[in-house]
Amino acid sequence: MSDIICISPIDGSEVARRPLMSDAALAHTLVAARAAQREWAQVPIAERATAMLRFLEAMRTLNPEIVPELAWQMGRPVRYGGEFRSFEERVRYMVSIAEQALAPVRLLDSKPGFERLIRREPLGLVLVVAPWNYPFLTAVNTIVPALMAGNAVILKHAAQTILVGERFAEAMAMADLPPGVFSNVVLSHDQTAQLLKSGAINHASFTGSVAGGKAIEQAAAGTFTTLGLELGGKDPAYVRADAVLDYAVENLVDGAFFNSGQSCCGVERIYVHADVYDRFVERFVAQTSEYVLGNPLDAATSLGPMAATRFAELVRAHTAEALAKGAHAHLDPAAFPADKPGTPYLAPQVLTNVDHSMRVMVEESFGPVVGIMKVANDAEALALMNDSPYGLTASLWTSDLDAAQALGAQIATGTVYMNRCDYLDPGLVWTGVKDTGRGASLSALGYETLTRPKSYHLRFQI
């Protein structure tokens, strides 16, 4: 047996070390979860809701400890206060719609002597394989709806944020959730694959790389386990000539660089109409230069290290290739003293004179770099936005609602934004197209992926 180890991007120290779960312990967890799920499914939705709100309050009490813990694990500055605000929004929303979303569907066309309806029943055991970049938000997207729908949940968290799984388990225990209904497990990639191959899991939700998603899909092949996969992204933004420029700049800088660019729906490429291009770039660079790169435990730091040196090296490689092909870098790394090659500390960078021959414009960088291209019109912007193997979100910056709707209809993406970006509304389904994945989470539609329909055709007059 080996251990899962979290190494801090702050200073390279060991944050946590946890032994892998033994096969016997995992088998016991599965048996306990299956038994607990059968009982949990009989609990009224209103009671499940009360339990989930207790869980939410438990997370609130833990948040002061969680915020610095997150900084140590993956580098997010403490000044941002962790993930609780969005976490709370998602939990409360999914709890509030559960009764209606899970209610039986009765056929509107009456048929004398018959009762015909469709109920939604829990799938059984739901495995959540969560990533490190937004470790609480990405996990809760499935965990709370799955539990509200009457499933049992098994959480396998990323090594980089291994303590997050323990925080979920701690909060569930504080909420008096029945034993076995939620379990946190420490597994290797091979163990996770074997678990999926076993057929013991009814639904698996994975957030991560395209390669990781393919591995999950291959492991589950032939088991009829349903899957939700949120994978890669290269989310574009288009700034039209009629955009409110200062507003667009402020929000796109944040959308590109928050969390050091390590966001599933972060903005990685921007297309700007020629009429406003120069002014946009000037203001965008000026605002980006205001970031303070440093130790995320320092309240003055607004840009922390990336989660690991290898992630920073990928961004450096994308940037270096673009520069070698003629791109122009607008920020001098020397202006950010904490930036050091060979470490996770990486200054933000804005590139112009870029094109789609450069990896920084077509491959997922997942870091604090963004390329900005000038375009002549909507048609050129649309073609470039769709020139990607990914499709999670796309944002349009304009004062014309009709234009945004017309363009949005032609963009291959899961979510279209107008005058906002890098935000997940729990009332809207979260999904992607192309290599970004399959399935859906959140909203009323999210409950459909965590349940199965069961028809009742009851004849009571003979």
Image (cartoon, helix red, strand yellow):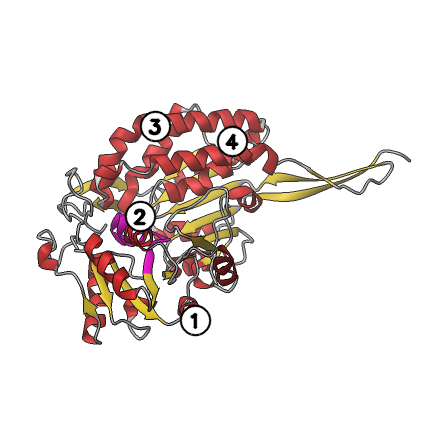
Numbered disc in front, either 2 or 1: 1
Answer few, some or many: residues within 10 Å of disc 4's Cα (few below 14, many 20 plus, some between 14 and 19): some
Marks 4, 2: nearer the viewer: 2
Mark seen at residue 60 = 3
Query: In the rendered image, which residue does mark 2 sit on?
Result: 133
Q: Is mark 2 on a helix, strand or loop?
A: loop
Mark 4 or mark 1: name the one nearer the start of the chain: 4
Label 2, label 1: how many angstroms apart (C-alpha)? 30 Å
Instruction: Measure how far apart labels 1 and 3 are at the Cα level.
Output: 44 Å
Q: Where does residue 438 sit, x and y in percent of width and height?
A: 49, 56
Marks 4/2: CA–CA distance: 31 Å
- On residue 383, the disc is 1
Left or right? Give the position of 259 relative to 91.
left
Q: Is mark 4 on a helix, strand or loop?
A: helix
Q: What residue type is labelled 1?
A: Ala
Residue 143 % position (x, y): 45, 39
Q: What element carries label 1?
A: helix
Query: Where is 278 relative to 7, above or below?
Result: below
Q: Magenta stretch: residue 91 in it?
A: no
The reply to whether discs 4 and 1 touch (Cβ–Cβ < 8 Å) is no
Task: Tell which circle, 4 or 2, labels the residue nearer the N-terminal end.
Answer: 4
